[in-house]
Image (cartoon, rainbow, N blue to C red):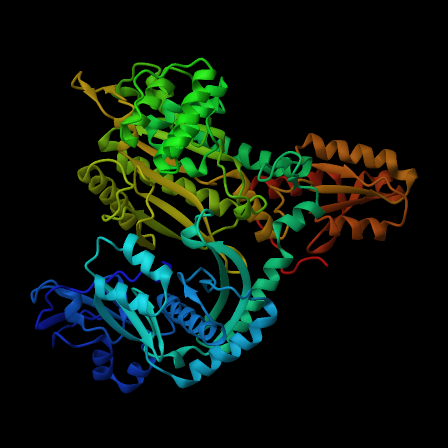
Amino acid sequence: MSQVNSGLSDASNSPVESVTVRLPDGTVHQHPGQTTPLDIATGISEGLARSVVAADVDGKVIDADRPLSELADSESQELGLRLLTSRDDEALDVLRHSAAHVMARAVMRLYKGVSLAFGPTTEGGFYYDFALDTPISEDDFSKIEAEMKAIIKQKEPFERFILERDEARQLCDDLDQDLKVEHIDTGLKEHPTVSFYRQGEFVDLCRGPHIPNAGKIKAIKLMSIAGSHWKGDTNNRPLQRLYGTAFFDKKQLKAYLERLEEAKRRDHRVIGKQHGLFSITPEVGQGLCLWLPKGARVRVALEDFLRKELLSRGYDPVYSPHIGRVELYETSGHFPFYRDSQFPPLFGSEVGALLDSWSNRLEAGTIDSDGEDKLMAAVEVLGVDLPDYKPSMNAEEKRRVLHEWQLGNERYLLKPMNCPHHCHIFKAQARSYRQLPLRLFEFGTVYRHEQTGELNGLLRVRGLTQDDAHIFCSQDQVEQEFRATIELTQFVLQSVGLDDYRVQLSLRDPDSSKYVGSEEQWDNAENALRGVLEQSGMDFNEEPGEAAFYGPKADFMVRDCIGRSWQLGTVQLDYNLPERFKLEYNGADNTAHRPVMIHRAPFGSLERFTGMLIEHFAGAFPMWLSPEQVRVLPLSDKSLDYAVSVARQLEEAGLKVTIDSSGGKVQAKIRNAQLDLVNYMAVVGPKEAETGQLALRDRIDGDLGSMPVAEAVARLTKEVNQRTVRQAVKIEE
């Protein structure tokens, strides 16, 4: 999980005098309370102590020199300790977090008036946001890197210290760090103490953890510069975001840079344009995909494959409209929880839009009495009377009056989620326990108002089609159904050759207020998911704070052929929407019961899944997904009639076939077919016409020799039906 310079302290209020530590080998030891993981490593061997980067204590990564007493609530508590070295994935995250501090320190040395924002790690490195008047460009990277290397060479330690909130605020004020002061005043106002890290003259508000000293950083590189805003809000102060990466050795950095170059060659936006798969134009709208015929063939193949599988597993198909009344999403909680990422409501009148804007301004506190008078006058001109609206009311009361008017008038929303619609499909008929589990599926298009700067081809769009399904079941069916959805997702990923993945169990953050439902419901849901994953023997990690607002979920994090991680399939357990929509079924005891709801989408969305596959396969899809499986190549126009006959036989077998009827030599036609990433080429001439054969060529393996058309059909359809996945090692130049 990304490390962020939030400054929140998690120090124990009353450190214990001794701690009990359990090591990975199962041995248990008693130590004085001030013992650190580094002390324990030293006790094992000096070599291990030199290798330790950080430590994992009961799943929490901490500094190697952090006293263990700060993590123990009592002397009877047993702490599970794992020492982290450069071989552990968590250690790289700690290293990069420390590198972000080194980068910030270097920038502050080279530029005046730098105000620090946040510096988290990312999947491939880290960044830091700065407010400064001087623009940083890529031409400045070499001098910043040189200063970073000079800091690293000093091998200065990262020293942690805690301050009371008022003292922390004063320190940040003394350091002229106004953004940190604001964060203490707003983001950390509920916390009595906060933590800092000092390295030389550099001090930063930060929760850590960090490496013991900067000398652990053996390879660093600045990657790019971009614009950003304070806390991600475009209404806030503009910032400069400097990206970098860091590794434990130079070989790792070299390999990473080579992967980046390979990723550029596999960019789905470039391949999509080259091979006519999809188009996104400003005339239609940014983030709105036009599936061109070849890309649509890939999508249809995915849909047909999954539809057939779902029908065989007892799912029922449904359809729902692209819009719904706003009240539908207010009930579900999607509106206003995710209002910023949804398109504005649609109204049948100008006054509806005006009142919606008015309500938003009241909520944001951006309206004064003069603006309010103008809005009231504008509403009166439109012929609407708001007798219950009084200027003396507080903002919440005013919003209530406006909302009551809106409830009496139709407001619609472009569908942000399919689940509220499926709840009403369940509710449309009386349900019995004998009908459960009820499994409903839909390839449903939903709409999200993503920021323009966040759009990215098919990977981040504004209109996306989810392979969405919702299972309504009884409590005693939850475990079985959840296990079945996990198995389905595994099957789908394996069918496209994606067998390198891990599962992330996304849980709620107990300190956050964004979640709906009772503690008991959340505990039941999280325990049910955890139990199934444990029983399945699958490797999984838990990530607090990553759950959906209505329930925990299991996300499949898939690695592609060049090592990048993608969040694809997801399974979510939900006790809350059935409660919100008052869903019921008649139980065996002839009384009403509340069903449990499971959300699942093995693809996630067809757009993102296809975009990922384009990059994974570099556009060279396996036979069963390919938009052009066979291209028939006549040697000359004299063989064109036979080529048409061969193509017809291949098409009748269900294969996707084209004919290259252009002039030119067959070698040029073969070259063009290979560049177009066609899986097979069928060369036909007078000899093949006379014997009823074709000369088959594999795009990867080359010439397969001549064979009867029926034999070629059997061979090719077998590869399609078995969903064989073969991938070229390199991209065709």
Q: Quadrant of residue 297?
A: top right
- Near-viewer residue (313 or 707): 313
**Residue shown at the point (48%, 80%) measured from the top left:** 149
From the viewer's side, name the closer residue of 523 and 430: 523
Tally the numbered discs: 0
Q: Is residue 383 above or below residue 686?
A: above
For residue 292, what is the image quadrant?
A: top right
Q: Is residue 620 visible?
A: no
Relative to 675, is 576 on the left or the right? left
Q: Residue at x 92, y 38 (%)?
A: 638
Residue 31 x/y as whole percent: 12, 76
The location of residue 439, given as percent across then percent down, is 37, 27
Q: Is residue 408 left or right of residue 680?
A: left
Q: In the rendered image, which quarter contains the C terminus?
A: bottom right
Residue 293 at least partly seen: yes
Q: Quadrant of the N terminus?
A: bottom left
Q: Position of residue 683 (x, y in %)?
A: 81, 45
- Tell me if residue 109 comes above or below residue 476 in the rendering: below
The residue most toward the right is: 638
Q: Position of residue 495 (x, y in %)?
A: 51, 44
Asked whether 146 or 532 is in front, the reply is 146
Quadrant hosting residue 261: bottom right
Residue drawn at point x = 82 percent, y = 37 percent: 643
Q: Which of 213/429 is in front?
A: 213
Query: Relative to 93, does residue 442 appear above or below in the rendering?
Result: above
